[in-house]
């Protein structure tokens, strides 16, 4: 009996290491392939202020990506966090409304991004008359990432021990002070993890933005101006066989941005957890 258990344990351990190594090898191959193809084309002309067919500058797309991420998070994070706080801390457990919201959030998480793009095109671009603009694209992305932020924040709040709440109530603090001074700081690492996932989805999104932000290779001049993000810029370059090297260089910049955001968020999460 003990021998059989040891054999199973050893077999599972080998399979775990095997698949973990395979996953790491695939990830390493993708990163090395992108870096080897893109670094030779990282030239100053790619970062010029204006785009043209000669320099194929990614700088306008880089700024548009930053503005899109910032505006989308400004809309989605407060709505998602406060919705999760209500569902966990204020709504009665077992409430039908709470169950309905959770089912809807899980359903919306599985909808393809192109459906969000079509909705944004019909509602923000056409019905509200915003046209292809930064505001229309950001609002569409905020709706798309809202279920993700709600669910991750909700699970993070649930993971906070009830002893934290009981101790705060025992010291005379109200529910609002307990939530914002005790519970939310304790759940901050999980909330930031959800925000990181949301940022990654925003940065890599193309289908939803084609129908709302547009694909103009210009510097975004305001909320109602069109533009393109780095992912759209990469898509446009790969569609043209003349700019394969510049496309890989754009992928390198996109990869560095994603890694930098993850590293910064992890650092902030550790700082918040210590305080």
Image: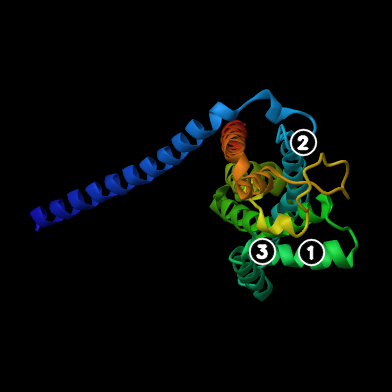
Q: Residue 114: which numbered mark, if any? A: 3
Marks 1, 2: nearer the viewer: 2
Label 1 and label 2: CA atoms lie apart by: 26 Å
User: Which residue is at 66% across, 63% downward?
Assistant: 114
- Contact flag, marks 3 and 2 (Cβ < 8 Å): no
- Residue matched to label 2: 51
- Contact flag, marks 3 and 1 (Cβ < 8 Å): no
Q: Position of residue 38 (x, y in %)?
A: 54, 33
- Residue matched to label 1: 121
User: Which residue is at 60% across, 30% downward?
Assistant: 271
Give left or right: position of 161 versus 74.
left
Q: Quadrant of residue 269?
A: top right
Residue at the extreme bottom: 96
**What SS does tag 2 mark?**
loop
Q: Earlier in the sequence, mark 1 or mark 2?
A: 2
Give left or right: position of 216 versus 204.
right
């Amino acid at each position: 009996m003990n021998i059989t258990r040891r054999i199973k344990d050893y077999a599972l351990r080998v399979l775990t290491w095997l698949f973990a190594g395979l996953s790491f090898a695939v990830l390493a191959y993708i990163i090395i392939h992108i870096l080897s193809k893109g670094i030779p084309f990282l030239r100053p002309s790619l970062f010029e202020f204006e785009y043209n067919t000669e320099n194929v500058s990614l700088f306008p797309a880089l700024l548009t990506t930053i503005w899109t991420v910032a505006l989308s998070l400004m809309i989605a994070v407060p709505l998602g966090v406060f919705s999760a706080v209500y569902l966990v801390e204020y709504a009665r457990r077992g409430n039908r409304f709470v169950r309905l919201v959770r089912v809807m959030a899980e359903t919306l998480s599985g909808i393809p991004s192109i459906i969000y793009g079509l909705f944004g095109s019909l509602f923000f671009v056409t019905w509200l008359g915003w046209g292809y603009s930064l505001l229309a694209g950001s609002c569409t992305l905020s709706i798309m990432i809202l279920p993700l932020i709600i669910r991750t924040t909700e699970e993070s709040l649930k993971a906070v021990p009830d002893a934290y709440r009981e101790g705060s109530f025992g010291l005379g603090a109200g529910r609002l002070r307990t939530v914002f001074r005790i519970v939310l700081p304790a759940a901050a690492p999980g909330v930031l993890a959800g925000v990181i996932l949301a940022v990654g989805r925003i940065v890599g999104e193309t289908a939803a933005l084609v129908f709302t932000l547009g694909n103009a290779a210009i510097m975004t001049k305001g909320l109602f101006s069109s533009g393109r993000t780095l992912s759209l810029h990469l898509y446009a370059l790969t569609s043209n066989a003349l700019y394969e090297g510049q496309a890989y260089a754009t992928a390198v910049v996109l990869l560095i941005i994603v890694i930098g955001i993850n590293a910064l968020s992890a650092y902030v999460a550790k700082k918040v957890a210590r305080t």
